């Protein structure tokens, strides 16, 4: 015989815990005698102190990350794409120059 602690919802008094035999019954009488249905317990959430602290600045812009802000400002897609292609071509040329030198 094994026991478990389960949460139940009394319609008059609210949530309470009770130690019951396994398998956990669907209804358990409350202290006042009212049948109380079993409810799922809230998960135990823990926050690490380091996760709760926000940093002063955001992550740096990655070199291969596309900047789509001009599109949001109304720049035509073809013009934006040409600008991005030129930026990529310039980056490749710079990379090739550094390999040769």
Image: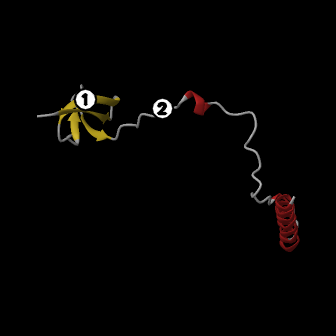
Q: Is residue 52 left or right of residue 67?
A: left
Q: Residue at x 29, y 35 (%)?
A: 8
Q: Is residue 73 left or right of residue 20?
A: right
* On screen, residue 27 above or below 64: above
Disc 2 is placed on an element classified as: loop
Residue 76 position by quadrant: bottom right
* On screen, residue 50 above or below 39: above
Q: Residue at x 46, y 34 (%)?
A: 45
| Within-10-Å neighbours for mark 2: few <14, some 14–19, many 20+ | few
Place of residue 35 in the rendered image (x, y in percent of width and height, measured from the top left): 23, 36
Q: Which residue, given by chain and number where applicable, does mark 2 sit on?
A: 46
| Within-10-Å neighbours for mark 1: few <14, some 14–19, many 20+ | some
Task: Locate the N terminus and report the quarter of the image it occupies.
Answer: top left
Q: Residue at x 18, y 41 (%)?
A: 23
The outermost residue toward the left is: 1
The outermost residue toward the bottom is: 78
Residue 42 position by quadrant: top left
Among the two numbered marks 2 and 1 on one chain, the one whose residue lies closer to the N terminus = 1
Q: Which residue, given by chain and number where applicable, does mark 1 sit on?
A: 18
- Tell which of 79 and 98 is nearer to you: 98
- Tell which of 10 and 75 is nearer to you: 75
Q: CA distance from mark 2 to mark 1?
A: 24 Å
Place of residue 95 in the rendered image (x, y in percent of width and height, measured from the top left): 82, 60
- Tell which of 92 and 62 is nearer to you: 92
Place of residue 79 in the rendered image (x, y in percent of width and height, measured from the top left): 88, 71
């Amino acid at each position: 015989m094994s026991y478990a602690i389960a949460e139940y919802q009394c319609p008059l008094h609210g949530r309470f815990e009770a130690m019951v035999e396994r398998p956990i019954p669907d209804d358990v009488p409350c202290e006042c005698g009212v049948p109380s249905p079993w409810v799922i317990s809230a998960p135990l959430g823990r926050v690490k102190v380091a996760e709760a602290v926000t940093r002063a600045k955001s992550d740096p812009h990655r070199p291969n990350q596309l900047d789509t802000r001009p599109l949001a400002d109304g720049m035509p897609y073809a013009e934006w794409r040409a600008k991005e292609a030129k930026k990529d071509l310039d980056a490749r040329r710079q990379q090739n120059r550094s390999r040769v030198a």
